[in-house]
Amino acid sequence: MAHYGLRRLNSNPNLGLRSIIRLCKLTNKDITISDVIFKIGPRINASGRMQSGVEAVDLLVSRDLHDAYEKGKDIDQYNRDRKELDKQITQEANRLIENNVGIVQGKRSIVIYNKDWHKGIIGIVASRLTELYYKPAVVLTYSNGMATGSSRSVQGFDIYSAVNSTRDLLENFGGHTYAVGLSMKEENIAEFSRRFEEYVSSNIQPNQLSPQLDIDAEIEFADITPELVSYLKKFNPFGPGNQKPVFCSRNVFDFGTSKLVGKNLEHIKLELEDNSTSHVINAIAFNMSQYFEHIHSHRPIDICYTIEQTKRSNNPDSIQLMIRDIRPSSDKK
């Protein structure tokens, strides 16, 4: 279905999707699964998160190009508003945890509540907390007379079963292994937190409390060629059940031109080399600025990454590595 959906998006999208594609600056480009996940999907989702999902439906069934574009612009604004609110609430959640160390200290889960948080954003905030602390997280707010929330899990842990173990405290819940929505009476939050933590502590495995990366192959930069990229494209579309191959390269160096980028200089735009080839490889490392001084000092690093193509061209300069993890090199294998 993903294959045929992408083929339709690239050949003959409906007017609503065409307007979103235009707003994402993807017109006349080869739309990929990543574009759907990070650009098109979030804009359509933002309508339901910030206002009403009806607007997204109206956009997708629109039969007038001008009308579709105007609706698309509204939804694009919702997405910008969603990003700002997401950032604000995530910062508030982190401050809440920092000021109340008992929320995470000695615990294997996180449950936090703030009645003023926007209901449409708390699922994203739960994901952010799970990524930051690598613990199953539940974020609750107040809506329609109930404490309503979203939960997210770490890889391999069934959060649906964890929530289900507290079902007598809940008014409603539903979801799947990695994400559950739930609601309860406000007075049940404390007991829910206790029992949720009890279940997680009893059932989660120690290795599930730290991020794991499965590496498909260790290669050198000389192996990263347009031919390899062409072969990898044959495995498309990527997604759950068919993840992008993750590669590892050891003892790579900064070419001397890497720099910090982003609004808060939180990302690193890299130009890297190794001893296998004289060709410089472009890379991007999101939210890894803590490694910049080590990299910039020309000391070797080991990297894990996926291989992307930044342009529709079959030359080495169109290849970019999406860095998944970095560590200083050592002699250990």
Image (tube, rainbow, N blue to C red):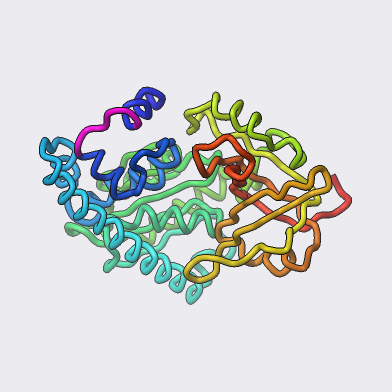
Quadrant where the N terminus sits is: top left
Residue 153 is at least partly visible in this image: yes
Q: Tell which of 297 and 100 is nearer to you.
A: 297
Q: Position of residue 322 (x, y in %)?
A: 59, 47
Residue 165 is at least partly visible in this image: no
Classify 241 as above or below 123: above
Quadrant where the C terminus sits is: top right
Q: Position of residue 223 (x, y in %)?
A: 74, 35
From which residue to which does the magenta span run?
Answer: 10-15
Q: Residue at x 29, y 65 (%)?
A: 117
Q: Residue at x 60, y 61 (%)?
A: 268
- Extreme residue toward the right, this view: 331
Location of residue 301 (image quadrant): bottom right
Classify 195 as above or below 87: above
Q: Residue at x 18, y 59 (%)?
A: 145
In the rendered view, does 61 fall on the left or right side of 33?
Answer: left
Q: Tell which of 34 and 226 is nearer to you.
A: 226
Q: Tell which of 293 and 242 is nearer to you.
A: 293
| Total labels drawn | 0
- The reply to whether the magenta stretch includes residue 11 is yes
In the rendered view, does 16 fall on the left or right side of 67?
Answer: right
Q: Position of residue 40 (x, y in %)?
A: 33, 44
- Extreme residue toward the bottom, this view: 99
Q: Residue at x 36, y 66 (%)?
A: 89
In the rendered view, does 257 fall on the left or right side of 239?
Answer: right
- The reply to whether the magenta stretch includes residue 70 is no
Q: Position of residue 177 (x, y in %)?
A: 44, 37
Q: Tell which of 305 and 212 is nearer to you.
A: 305
